[in-house]
Image (cartoon, helix red, strand yellow):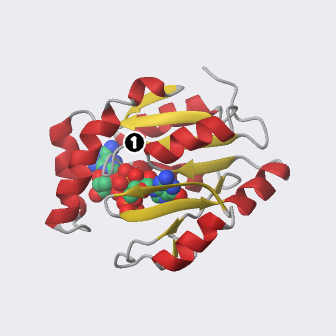
Amino acid sequence: MSASSTPGRLTVITGPSGVGKGTLVARLLQRHPRIWLSVSATTRAPRSGEQEGRSYFFLSRDVFEAQVAAGGLLEWAEFAGNFYGTPRSPVEQHLAQGQPVLLEIELEGARQVRRSFPAAYQVFIEPPSFEELQRRIRGRGTDSEEAIVRRLERARVELQAAPEFDARLVNGDLDEALGRLELLMGFA
Ligand code: ADP
Ligand code: 5GP
């Protein structure tokens, strides 16, 4: 078990789309409000209920590319036809203030962070089975069939990367997974 809750610790949560990362992170933040969750930039269109600056910063491709060129993103990747990236300076500011910082990002971004922040603690969330992952991503009801197919294809590749991570966590029962995540992060 890791003593990873030292102030200013950077934790990265990754896993295939639909595995429950957002659900787990929202519950974790409710229970531990001092964790600061990075708000990513994306070129994806907002889903119903998503708010600018809270869910994401929703950018055009041109603006996103300008941010990349200016070095404003800590990491970025293309996922299922859209760009996603982590604004650099808020992460650095919160770490400098000694706050625990959380990134919820896909695999390629996690690999970039592994290179730039080798001390970051990286957790990979796994589904109990691929069938359950399909059920969840369809059950969420937020994506078109085309987007679901792309995400499931990508999920098969991402799942093979689980052994690269500091910790692997199966999100079967939500409460149990949350408890294990808290333990891994040193918050329990
Ligand atoms: P991600 O952020 O990884 O794409 P979400 O958090 O949006 O995934 O979860 C995808 C769907 O699965 C949502 O409908 C969510 O309510 C559901 N879900 C999340 N965790 C669990 C769980 N442990 N058991 C059953 N359903 C879950
Ligand atoms: P969604 O479109 O479902 O919100 O997110 C799709 C994928 O992009 C998820 O796996 C999510 O973790 C990932 N993601 C969200 N923000 C970022 C980011 O800033 N960088 C990277 N690399 N991936 C991100």
- Whether the residue carrying mark 1 lies under 8 Å from ligand 1 is answered with yes
Q: Quadrant of the N terminus?
A: top right
Ligand 2 position by quadrant: bottom left
Within-10-Å neighbours for mark 1: few <14, some 14–19, many 20+: many
Q: In which quarter of the image is the C terminus?
A: top right
Left or right of 174: which side holds 143? left
Which residue is identified by label 1?
Answer: 15
Q: Nearer the viewer, residue 117 or 188?
A: 117
Q: What element carries label 1?
A: loop
At which x and y percent is residue 18? 30, 51
Relative to 64, say whether 147 is above or below: above
Q: Nearer the viewer, residue 5 or 187?
A: 5
Q: Is residue 174 visible?
A: yes
Q: Nearer the viewer, residue 108 or 21?
A: 108
Left or right of 86: which side holds 104? left
Residue at left 34%, top 38%? 158
Residue at left 44%, top 43%? 107
